[in-house]
């Protein structure tokens, strides 16, 4: 645990106060529910790119991923490979059309509203189903962020997990409550920059202390060659690294499959919906993909450097970033580096909190309880929903749990429930509301039940990450029901990827005939 020093306390204090100030500053700009939910669709390319990246990575970037690499070696970095590929594909094939089509779909501010309009579902069940999936999985996801925040505060200041969790939750609720999407996105630009600098600086310092990459390689090989084998994972038990089991095809596929989840993450897709124009997307894609490559490579190196540099093995591998900061740099620099960890945790939790609150307001309150609600009422309900979701997530977070495990479950839930449906909604004109509903339900249920289903397979038990069967099941269900059940929408917007709303309306794709 890092000693309770004035520099570290000051760094955290200044950062947390700055976040609240941003909330107060953006409060005046959040006069409508559209501004609260999507910032009026005015994000510039750099802000959209950094906000998408920061909201994506969460506490696992500096806690879960370095911890996994610290314990298992570079075999754990297959996750990072999958995420880089998924990030590029998401910006390339989803962002342009989703930005265009959500504006065409009645200027939709939620995925649920977009899907309802896209498939002309007048029964409202598609909207209800998608909103339920968002609220349920995001509440769990927010809880993972709060767990990471509580762990960070306790590890650094020794204040106790519950107290750290409470402080972290209160700060997030305050600025999200006040400034909504605008506050969240502005703070993400600051946080994304901090995360980038930390991911470069800390491993660079560690490698410099060791004497270069050759020295790092030698130190790792001396513990066990498995740490340097992409085809294997080392075993870390009782402070010792030993050769573990080779990584089979199932394990590699499970790690790479994290990249498949991008197509269905509402907090990332919201950045695509909120970008100023499709013309800003190519620049945003280059910034976003470059940022992801650097921070994931840096986080992986932090785990390896921790294995080689730290004076004694860690009881909890997920604290490797914290331990390295304490050992390698002075308290002032450590304070800045540790703020980056806090930024990574907070930048995802606030995005998920806002998306959940927006879904409750738009897809439950306005859609089913008050169709003619005023903007003032919607803003009030939206802000109240921020508090409500945070309270539920807080209760869940009090039970603790491994950050990476909680994130993996929620990530799989969204990836399977929404990924195939979103892609088909953008690229398959014949897709029907029945197909969307079937795909969503099949994907979500498969993820929820897979841990119970897989053991029942007996000799065929796979041990594969639930994302994979979830996406396969959702895709099959969506294709079958989309082909044979229901009528395709009378209106479709399937055009080219760079279409503007105006081009789509007057060009191809106005009718399915």
Image (cartoon, helix red, strand yellow):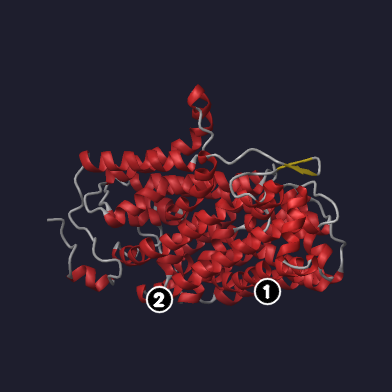
Residue 37: x and y in percent read 46, 64
Q: Label 2 crowding class (10 Å Cα cut-off): few <14, some 14-19, many 20+?
A: some
Specify whether 281 is left or right of 302.
left
Q: Label 1 crowding class (10 Å Cα cut-off): few <14, some 14-19, many 20+?
A: some
Mark closer to the observer (2, 1): 2
Q: Nearer the viewer, residue 322 or 165?
A: 322
Q: Which residue is mark 1?
A: 18
Quarter where residue 395 is shown: top right
The secondary structure type at the circle numbered 2 is: helix
- Give the answer, above or below, for where 155 lies relative to 238: below
Badge 2 or badge 1: first in the primary sequence: 1
Quarter where residue 501 is shown: bottom left
* Quarter of the N terminus within the rendering: bottom right
Residue 261: x and y in percent read 47, 51
Residue 296: x and y in percent read 59, 61
Q: Which residue is mark 2?
A: 280
* Quarter of the C terminus within the rendering: bottom left
């Amino acid at each position: 645990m890092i000693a309770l020093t004035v520099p570290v306390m000051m760094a955290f204090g200044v950062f947390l106060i700055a976040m609240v100030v941003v909330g107060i500053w953006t409060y005046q700009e959040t006069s409508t529910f559209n501004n609260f939910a999507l910032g009026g669709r005015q994000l510039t390319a750099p802000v959209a790119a950094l906000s998408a990246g920061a909201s994506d990575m969460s506490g696992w970037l500096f806690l879960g991923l370095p911890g996994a690499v610290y314990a298992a070696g570079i075999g754990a970095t297959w996750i990072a490979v999958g995420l880089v590929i998924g990030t590029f594909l998401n910006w390339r094939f989803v962002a342009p059309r989703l930005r265009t089509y959500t504006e065409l779909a009645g200027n939709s501010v939620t995925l649920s509203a977009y899907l309802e309009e896209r498939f002309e579902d007048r029964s409202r069940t598609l909207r209800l189903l998608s909103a339920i999936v968002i609220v349920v999985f995001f509440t769990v996801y927010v809880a993972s962020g709060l767990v990471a925040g509580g762990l960070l505060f306790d590890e650094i200041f020794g204040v106790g997990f519950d107290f750290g969790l409470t402080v972290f939750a209160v700060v997030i609720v305050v600025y999200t409550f006040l400034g909504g999407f605008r506050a969240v996105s502005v703070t993400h630009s600051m946080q994304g920059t901090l995360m980038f600098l930390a991911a470069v600086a800390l491993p660079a310092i560690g490698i410099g202390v060791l004497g270069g990459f050759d020295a790092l390689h030698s130190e790792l090989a001396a513990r066990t060659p498995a740490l340097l084998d992409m085809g294997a994972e080392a075993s870390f038990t009782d402070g010792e690294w030993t050769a573990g089991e080779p990584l089979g095809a199932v394990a590699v596929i499970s790690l790479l499959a994290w990249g498949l989840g991008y197509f269905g993450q509402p907090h990332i897709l919201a950045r695509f919906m909120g970008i100023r124009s499709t013309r800003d997307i190519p620049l945003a894609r280059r910034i976003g993909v470059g940022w992801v490559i650097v921070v994931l490579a840096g986080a992986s190196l932090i785990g390896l450097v921790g294995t080689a540099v730290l004076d004694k093995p860690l009881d909890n591998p997920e604290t490797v970033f914290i331990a390295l900061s304490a050992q390698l740099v002075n308290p002032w620099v450590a304070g800045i580096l540790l703020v980056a960890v806090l930024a990574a945790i907070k930048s995802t939790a606030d995005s998920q909190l806002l998306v959940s609150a927006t879904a409750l307001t738009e897809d439950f309150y306005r859609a089913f309880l008050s169709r003619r609600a005023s903007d003032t009422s919607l803003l009030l309900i939206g802000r109240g929903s921020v508090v409500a979701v945070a309270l539920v997530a807080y209760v869940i977070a009090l039970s603790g749990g491994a950050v990476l495990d909680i994130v993996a479950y929620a990530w799989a839930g969204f990836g399977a429930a929404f990924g195939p449906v979103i892609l088909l909604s953008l690229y398959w004109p014949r897709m029907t509301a029945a197909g969307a509903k079937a795909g969503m339900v099949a994907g979500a249920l498969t993820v929820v039940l897979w841990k119970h289903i897989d053991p029942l397979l007996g000799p065929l038990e796979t041990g594969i990450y639930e994302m994979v069967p979830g996406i396969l099941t959702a895709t099959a269900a969506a294709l079958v029901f989309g082909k044979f059940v229901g009528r395709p929408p009378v209106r479709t917007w399937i055009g080219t990827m760079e279409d503007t709303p105006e081009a789509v309306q007057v060009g191809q794709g106005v009718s399915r005939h």
